[in-house]
Amino acid sequence: DAKTTQPPSMDCAEGRAANLPCNHSTISGNEYVYWYRQIHSQGPQYIIHGLKNNETNEMASLIITEDRKSSTLILPHATLRDTAVYYCIAPIYNQGGKLIFGQGTELSVKP
Amino acid sequence: GAGVSQSPSNKVTEKGKDVELRCDPISGHTALYWYRQSLGQGLEFLIYFQGNSAPDKSGLPSDRFSAERTGGSVSTLTIQRTQQEDSAVYLCASSLRSTGVYNEQFFGPGTRLTVL
């Protein structure tokens, strides 16, 4: 997988936007960026993915820079239930989509 | 609809015994993945199956680990002669396909394995 770098931890106030950055400077042109999260004691949960255009779904928005070397996951109105470890992953193209997880960012949403 | 299910949810075994962990993927999902998460460690890829293709076993940590997928559905992960370092949560995931643009993977709740 393209190596991704994320800050180990972040705090966010409840109701505010949480902006989680990810660097993936070695990403190839056909490698997508995926975001998953893992709430304590649960399996990972898919959030969103994108190639080069910004993406939005009911959970989050994904902003990818024009050079594709970094991206930001945005949770527009964070709640206490969004406290989790967030993983940014770029699976190698045509290798089955296996996810190689890094350490991720531990997001703590505080009241 | 039903998600990915795994059994047992917890398994305690003695060092040296064999264990089998089961995964029932979402119906219709052709790709199936196994991962594990050791205490305080990150998630580690083990093996993946796609349809009738040969599985990608590149993540299996030793030859004591094996997995099979029967009929393109249920999968069993077998660990022979378990060691204490095998203690971890074993997670299974499935997705619609695994070529080109990869679809999201749906994870099961995991099996917590404890080797005494």
Image: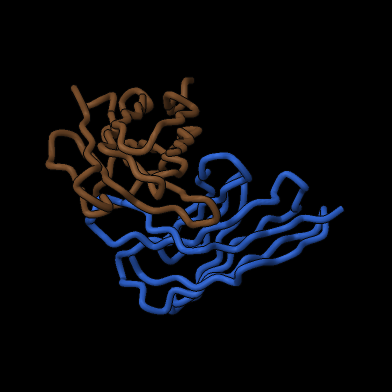
Chain colours: A blue, B brown
Residue B66's image quarter? top left
A90 lies left or right of B41: left
Q: Is residue A101 above or below residue B105?
A: below
Residue at (26% x, 24% y) in the render: B73
B45 lies left or right of A84: left
B90 lies left or right of B16: right
Between residues A66 and B14, which one lies in front from this camera angle?
Answer: B14
Total marks in image: 0
Residue B71's image quarter? top left
Where is residue B100? Give x, y as percent: 26, 52
Residue at (36% x, 38% y) in the render: B15
Where is residue A23? Give x, y as percent: 49, 75
Residue at (32% x, 36% y) in the render: B96
Residue at (31% x, 72% y) in the render: A28
Q: Is residue A71 above or below residue A89?
A: below
Where is residue A8? Give x, y as percent: 61, 69
Q: Quadrant of the C terminus of chain B?
A: top left
Between residues B16 and A64, which one lies in front from this camera angle?
Answer: B16
Where is residue A21? Give x, y as percent: 59, 70
